Image (tube, rainbow, N blue to C red):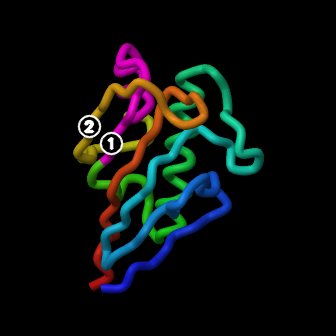
Amino acid sequence: MNKVIISTDQAPAAIGTYNQAVKVGTAVYLSGQIPLVPETMEVISEDFAAQAQQVFKNLTAVCEAAGGQLQDMVKVNIFLTDLSNFATVNDIMSQHFATPYPARAAIGVRELPKGVQIEIDGIMELPSTN
């Protein structure tokens, strides 16, 4: 199968040797998004909830650029520098997803790029066009 590179200026540009997402067939593999504002490439805020909201906004933009929507994500990995923010992530995630929710892992990490508190990556399955 062919790989299709997904890119949008509605999400932060890649800051390394990767793409925002790669589509293979109907699967889209989304790179990790951190809470950068696409227009400025700066962290939105020090506030955890604001960071989480920005990450979901960025993921939504990449999903849409790939021809899907956030609800089409089937797996998400959430990386947190402080697991005490777990309940806040659950609350914010419920604002962006309806049931059935995607499979998910929440992983505590020591640090993330640019000193942010959250990063999310995942896999999206595009609806069949048949």
| Residue 1 image offset from top left, x and y in percent | 30, 85
The 10 Å Cα crowd at callout 1, few under 14, some 14 to 19, many 20 or more, is some
Q: Let me know if residue 84 is in the magenta part.
A: yes
| Residue 67 image offset from top left, x and y in percent | 47, 71
Figure quadrant of the C terminus: bottom left
Name the residue at 54% across, 41% down: 34
Against 82, residue 97 (above or below) is below
**What residue type is disc 1 on?**
Asn
Name the residue at 38% across, 34% down: 79
Numbered badge on residue 105: 2
Against 20, residue 41 (above or below) is above
Provide the residue designation for mark 1: 77
- The picture quadrant where one finds residue 30 is bottom left
Numbered badge on residue 14: none
Q: Are marks 1 and 2 in contact (CB under 8 Å)?
A: yes
Against 77, residue 48 (above or below) is above
For mark 2, give the secondary structure: strand
Range of residues picked out in magenta: 76-93
| Residue 82 image offset from top left, x and y in percent | 41, 18
Towards the viewer: 112 or 37:
112
User: Could you tell whether 129 is left or right of 45 in the image?
Assistant: left
Q: Main secondary structure of the magenta part?
A: helix
Against 127, residue 33 (above or below) is above
Name the residue at 59% across, 28% down: 50
Q: Let me know if residue 81 is in the magenta part.
A: yes
Q: Residue furthest front?
A: 17
Name the residue at 53% across, 60% down: 17
How many badges with numbers are in the image?
2
**What residue type is disc 2 on?**
Ala
- The picture quadrant where one finds residue 126 is bottom left
